[in-house]
Structure formats: structure tokens, C-alpha cells
Amino acid sequence: MLQVYGHPFASFYWKAAVALYERGIPFEFLMVDPEHPENSEAIRKLSPTGQFPVLVDGDRVVIESAAIIEYLDLHHGDAPPLVPADPRAAIEARQMDGIFDDYVMAPLTRMVLHAIRKEGEKDPLAIVEAQGALDKSYAWLNRWMAGRTWAANEAFSIADVSAASALFYAHWGYPIPEELAELRAYRARLLARPSIARVIEEARPYRDFFPLKGHSPD
Ligand SMILES: N[C@@H](CCC(=O)N[C@@H](CS)C(=O)NCC(=O)O)C(=O)O
């Protein structure tokens, strides 16, 4: 059986988990936390910096959430692929996957890492810059989503898988303004999808770990 290293509260683990749920693939979940040091030890060897998700399929190890999604498309399950088979359509899906990872999840991660810095090591400019990046991304995505149901090619894809974790956490840490109605409605559509609702529920017991408190994640 496939093995997947991750943590239920980890945004990039969500990408792998949503793909597994979308495709109905059974897997063994290997929790990466202090109570399972053997799993942390394993991924330190398997991935360059010990980050997760990591997928193990027999002798094959796949790292990077997007690569895991593409691997599952090819080798497991029989749902439509999350990266479109048509390479022309795949361009837009990969473009949007990258945008959600790099221009939403990345600035949000900078805010999270800043929040857990010790007093005296904080850098207010880092927060201003991260929030400025999110302001731009939110506005651009609001325009992009006008007239669309899903982020790429009008079909649920890897782009929406990335969007789900990025927008779930970003809105929690730095709310999407009410006037960006298209983006807020898209986020609500994502959260209603069964595979995504499932990862949100699995993560619920860990919500107190989120350091950017004060906003509703719902
Ligand atoms: N580009 C990687 C990012 C992976 C990543 O940032 N993983 C986080 C969890 S969501 C992690 O491993 N954090 C623990 C650490 O950095 O030690 C991917 O797409 O899989």
C-alpha cells in the first residue's frame, strides 16, 4: 500500500491528501510529529530538507506535493487527472498551482514564521511586505475568478487543490476583504468540496497551533 508522510494541519500535506481522496486511493498515513520520531528520521533521509509530504510507493519515493499529484494521476485511481492530459490545458493548471503556492501560501508562511519568532527578533517590515504581497495576490485572483467556477480550464484540477490550502489558511491569517466577492465565493466553493471538507475536518483538532489567531478560518 502507498505510504504518505505528513501532518493533518500541514498545508502542503493537504495537497497530497486531497488528491488521494479525489482519486479514492487507500494509503497508510505516517504522522510527522514529535511523538513519531521514526517518521521524522525517515523523511530527513528521503527529502532534501526533511519537508513533507513524501510519498513512498514500493521502491519509488516522490517528493513535492505537485509531483505527488502528477504521480497519482498516472499510477493510481481512475478519476480524471488533476493535471489535464492535454498539455495545452495543463499549462494553465500548473500556472495556477504555482500562483497559489508562491503568491498566496508563501507570503502567508512568512507571516506564520514571523509570528513564532522570539520577541526581539521580530521584523515589522517582514509583515508589511507579506501582507502587501497578499493584497496584490487577492486582488489579482479576484479578477481571475470572475466568471469562473474553478481556477483553470473550468474543471477541478491541481490548481484548486493548491488554492484550497492556500486560501483556507491565508484567509484565516489575513482575511480576504469583503469586496473581493469573487475570491471569497471561490474559497467557499472549495471548502464545500467533499475531499477538501475532509482534510479541514482532519485538521480541526490542531487549530490551536495556528499562530495567527484572531480571525475565523470558516
Ligand atoms: N514545495 C514543497 C513544500 C513542502 C512544505 O513546505 N512542507 C511543510 C509542511 S506543509 C513542512 O515540511 N514543514 C516542516 C519543515 O519545514 O520542517 C511541496 O510542495 O511539497
Image (spheres, helix red, strand yellow):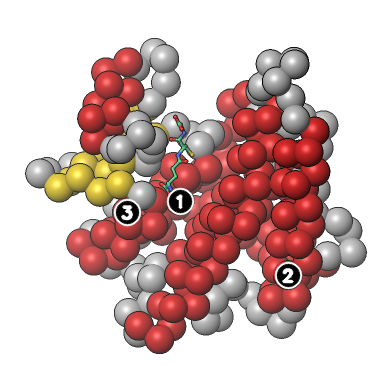
Q: Which mark is residue 140?
A: 2
Label 1, label 2: how far apart the Cα atoms are: 22 Å
User: On the rendered structure, is 151 left or right of 80?
Assistant: right
Residue 201 horizontal/vertical position (percent) = 57, 38
| Mark 3 CB near ligand 1 (8 Å cut) | yes
- Residue 128 appears in the figure: yes
Secondary structure beneath label 2: helix
Quarter occupied by the C terminus:
top right
Secondary structure beneath label 3: helix
Question: Above or below — where is 144 with respect to 212?
Answer: below
- Residue 29 appears in the figure: no
Q: Which residue is mark 1?
A: 15
User: Which of disc 2 and disc 3 is earlier in sequence?
Assistant: 3
Seen at 41% across and 77% down, the residue is 90
| Mark 1 CB near ligand 1 (8 Å cut) | yes
Disc 1 and disc 3 in contact, CB within 8 angstroms: yes
Q: Inspect the image, locate mark 3, and give the three-letter code of the amino acid beneath it.
A: Ile
